[in-house]
Image (tube, rainbow, N blue to C red):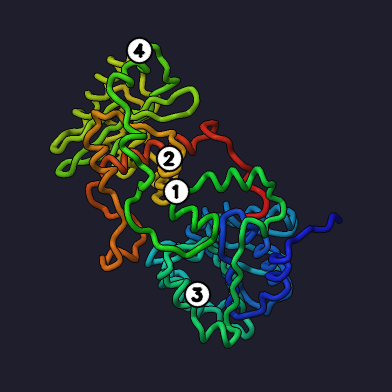
Amino acid sequence: MKMLKLSPKQKDFYNNSTAKINVAHGAVRSSKTFIVNLRWLKYIRYGPPGTLLMSGNTKESLRENVLEDLFEIVGQENYRYNSTSGILHMFGRKIECKGADNINAEKKIRGRTYAGWYGDEITVHHKSFVYQAIARCSVPNAQLFWTTNPDHPKHYIKTDFIDNPQMRQSGMLKHWHFFLEDNIILTPDYMAMLEASYTGVFYLRNIKGLWVVADGLVYADYDEKKHNISRAEVEKLIKPRAFKEYIAGTDWGMTAPMTGLIYGVTRDNKYIQIDEYYKTGQLTEDLGNWYLMQEQRLERKINNIYCDSAEPDRIATLRKMGLKARGADKEINAGLNTVMVLFKNDRLLICEDCRDTINELLTYRFPEPDDPKFKQDKPLDEDNHAMDGKRYCLHTYIGKPGAKATTARRGMR
């Protein structure tokens, strides 16, 4: 059998994660999940007897992030998994797999007794689930193993657990801060590519593994002088078909503005916003007619219109009008980072006529420290209609197969 080569940090976690609560946190792709998986397999076989608990943001994310890797390691003859019930049998042990993303999740484990718990992406678990699960792990010598990328420095996982002096001094909690360098299978080229994929607060969290505050302007790298382009320059690109395709993003509205943003994608993968629709009191058909008018002007179809998926009936209306509308990937932080990186690398330009988009870019910000919304760690939900449409479009398009270089899901994460 081929021997695994582990980094010193991985070996330390595997051999010394002996506390009640053991937390692996830090950079993305830094081998946290991989080594916790190995440690968990050891715990399944040799930990105290009883039912175990595994949890993720959802059951689906737990399967994608953890279970599929475990299945590959142990082989299909050593486990049975019912994806509907979330019941896993492995090495003769029963394991209950749960999603923990909402306030109702903790009801699913009330009254249960567990001999151990693996919590993946613990910072996105609902707080009530975390405290309920801790209380449920009442079998003598039960241990907890958590993984997470950093979040807000005032996140309860940081303040109540990782930075809790009583827990640390008593040995009840141990934590390991993982860096990219702790994943010894990563090449220098891959690490350089990964570092270039983040900027701002997301660089500090996902690359440096720091628990830092998101503050100030969201798109601080946006520069009007650098990133705005004249209408004449846009028309020069449209006429000779310099764009390989057109894409668009829509945020629905009625009393708030409804937005439609159209981007031309160049052959060297730059994104130029060529026009905007930004109006209140409009029907879905009004926006659809504007898109149809734009297609006539461009003499080409818009390849995809990525819409807020919260209103499928309106998406269906656009489709009936002959438009290629579809629901968007609405993940907030990942989407913000996609747009941030485009501005940082000067791959996103805005036509100077798109004044509402430009106005939002200049005011879209995170809450101030004295704002009650500060701990939510999200941009203020105001004057963000074009910003949402922009994120829906660019993040969904760039994330689709073939739109960018992809990396294997497997390996040390």
Task: Tell me which label, 2 or 1, sits earlier in the chain.
Answer: 1
Q: Which residue is mark 1?
A: 334
Residue ID at (46%, 53%): 202
Q: Which residue is mark 3?
A: 133
Task: Tell me which label, 1 or 3, sits earlier in the chain.
Answer: 3
- Secondary structure of the residue carrying tag 2 is helix
Across and down, in percent, residue 250 comes to 30, 36
Across and down, in percent, residue 124 comes to 45, 62
Q: Which mark is residue 84?
A: none
Give left or right: position of 2 versus 186: right
For the residues carrying marks 4 and 3, which lies nearer the camera in this image?
4
> Would you call the spot at circle 3 few (<14 residues within 10 Å), some (14-19), or many (20 or more)?
many
Q: Which residue is mark 4?
A: 239
- Report if the CB atoms under discs 2 and 1 are less than 8 Å apart: yes
How far separated are the C-alphas under marks 4 and 1?
Answer: 34 Å
Q: Which residue is mark 2?
A: 395
- Secondary structure of the residue carrying tag 1 is helix
Task: Tell me which label, 4 or 3, sits earlier in the chain.
Answer: 3
Residue ID at (15%, 38%): 280
201 above or below 336? below
